[in-house]
Amino acid sequence: MIELLIANLAPLMFLALVVLLLMGYPVAFALAANGLLFGFIGIELGLLTPSLLQALPDRIFGIMRNDTLLAIPFFTFMGLILERSGMAEDLLDTIGQLFGPLRGGLAFAVIFVGALLAATTGVVAASVISMGLISLPIMLRYGYDRRLASGVIAASGTLAQIIPPSLVLIVLADQLGRSVGDMYEGAIVPGLCLTGLYALYILGVTMIRPKWVPALPLEARTLHGLALLRRVIVSLMPPLILIFLVLGTIFIGVATPTEGGAMGATGALILALLNRRLNWSLLKQAMDTTAKLSSFVVFILIGSTVFTLVFRGVDGDLWVDHLLTSVPGGELGFLIVVNILVFFLAFFLDFFELAFIVVPLLAPVAEKLGIDLIWFGVLLGVNMQTSFMHPPFGFALFFLRSVAPSSEFIDKITGRRLAPVTTGQIYWGAVPFVCIQIVMVSLVIAFPNMVLSRIHHVPTSDEMNIQIDVPAPDSETPSIDIQ
C-alpha cells in the first residue's frame, strides 16, 4: 500500500488541488496548503527530505526581487486612471459618431475602441465595464439585438488580455522564463487578427440579420464635417501617443516593460490632469484597486511556488512529461491535447489560476518537444482569453452583468420604456465570439510565423559543433573540429 502511495503521490497531489479549487477555497491558499500537506506526507514516506522545504524562503524572496512583476501594478494603475478619467467615454462617443451612418456602426465602434483601450489599459474589467456603461444603453436605444450587443461588448473588452500591454502576457512571460518584450511583440499580430475577425463577424451579421444592427438615425448624429474631424483627432491623439510611449519604446528597445509601464502610468496621470479629472478620490480608488490586484498576484505566485517545489520533489514533472510526451501525434498531438485541456479548464479557472498552475507543468514538455516558448505562450494567451467569455463562469460576462439593466428602465434620451438584458441573452451573445477565439487558436497553430516573424531571436552558437582554429609554428592553420 505504501509503495502504491509513493508511486502515485504526484497524481494524487494534483487531484487534491483540483478538489480544493472546486470546493471554492482561495487559489493562493489552496496551492500553498496542498504543497505543504503533500510535502509533509512525502517526508513521512521517506520520499522527500526536510531540507527541500528550506528552499522556500529563497524562492519567495526571488519573487519579491523579480523586477518584471513591477509592470503589473504600473499597467493596472495606468488602466484604472484612464478608465476613470473619461477617455473611454470620449472615444466611444467620437467613434460612434464616425461609424454611425453605417449599419452595425456602433458595434464596429465598440470593437475599434475595445482594441484601443486594450492597447492603453491592459485591464479587462476596466474595458468591459466602461463600454457596458457607455455603449450598451445607446445600442439598446437604437434597436440593436440584445445578444449581439452583449457579446460584442464582452468580447471587445477581453482584447485587453491578448493585445499588449496585457497583464496575462506579463505573467506568462514570467512563468515561461521569457522576455516580456518578446511576448508583447509576438502577440501584436494575433491580437489585431482577432480584432479583425470580430469585425468580420459583425459585417456578416449586417448582411444576414440587418435588423439586429441598425444604423444611427440622423437625429442621433450630432457631429458632421470639420467638427467631427476635429473631435476624432482630439480624441484619438492622446491614446495613440500613450500607446507609442508604452509599447513603442519597448519594441524599439529604449525601455524595458517595467519602465514602459512606469511611463504609461505617468502619461495616464498627465492625461487625467489635462482633462481636469484628476482628484484625490480618483487617485485613492486607483491605488486601492492596484494594491489589491498586485497582492492577489503575489500571493498566488507564492502559493504556486510552494506547490511547484513539492510537486517536482515527488517527481510530478516527470509524471506530466511522460503523460504528455506519450500523446500520439508528436508535437501536433501535444498542442491539440493541451489546447483542449486549457479550453475546458477555463470553464472553472480564471487566467491567473491557469497561468500559475497549468503553464509551469506544460512549459518543460513544450521545450523538450522543441516548441518555441514565446509562440507557445501567445497561443496559450489566445486560448485562455476564452476563460473570460465561457458561460457560465466567464468574468467578462459577470462584469457586463453588473452594469447591464436587469429590469425595465426608462431611456434618458427618448423617454421610452426599454426591456432589460437577461443573463441568458448575455451568455448566448458570448457563444459566437468564443467560437471566433477557437478559430484564432487554430490560426496561430497553423501559421506560427504570425507570432515568430516579429521576435528577434539572439543567435546562439552550436555547442555540439565548434570549430577552433589553432595557429601552428609552421604558419599553417589547421582546424580542429569538436563534435
Image: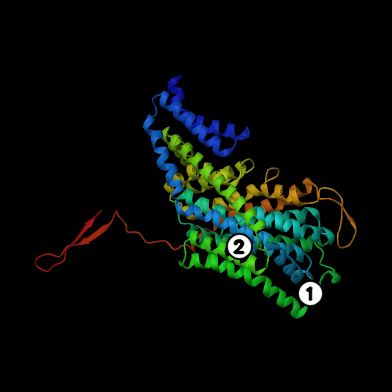
Relative to 447, say whether 315 is above or below.
above
Identify the residue at the far left of this view.
474
| Crowd class of label 1 (few under 14; some 14 to 19; many from 20; radius 10 Å) | some
- Which numbered dot is residue 289? none
Task: Measuring from the top left, give residue 141's x and y in whole percent.
Answer: 84, 60
In the picture, measured across the screen, residue 1 lies left or right of residue 381, that is left
Q: Which residue is mark 1?
A: 223
Q: Are marks 2 and 1 in contact (CB under 8 Å)?
A: no
- The amino acid beneath tag 2 is Thr
Q: Tag 2, which secondary structure?
A: helix
The one nearer the camera, 293 or 284, is 284
Q: Which residue is mark 2?
A: 120
Relative to 352, say whether 271 is above or below.
below
Spatial separation of the CA atoms under disc 2 and disc 1: 26 Å
Picture quadrant of residue 477 = bottom left
Q: Tag 1, which secondary structure?
A: loop
Task: Measuring from the top left, give residue 469's x and y in whole percent.
Answer: 20, 63
State the scheme by which the image is colored.
Answer: rainbow
Identify which residue is drawn at 75% across, 69% down.
99
Relative to 207, say whether 124 is above or below.
above
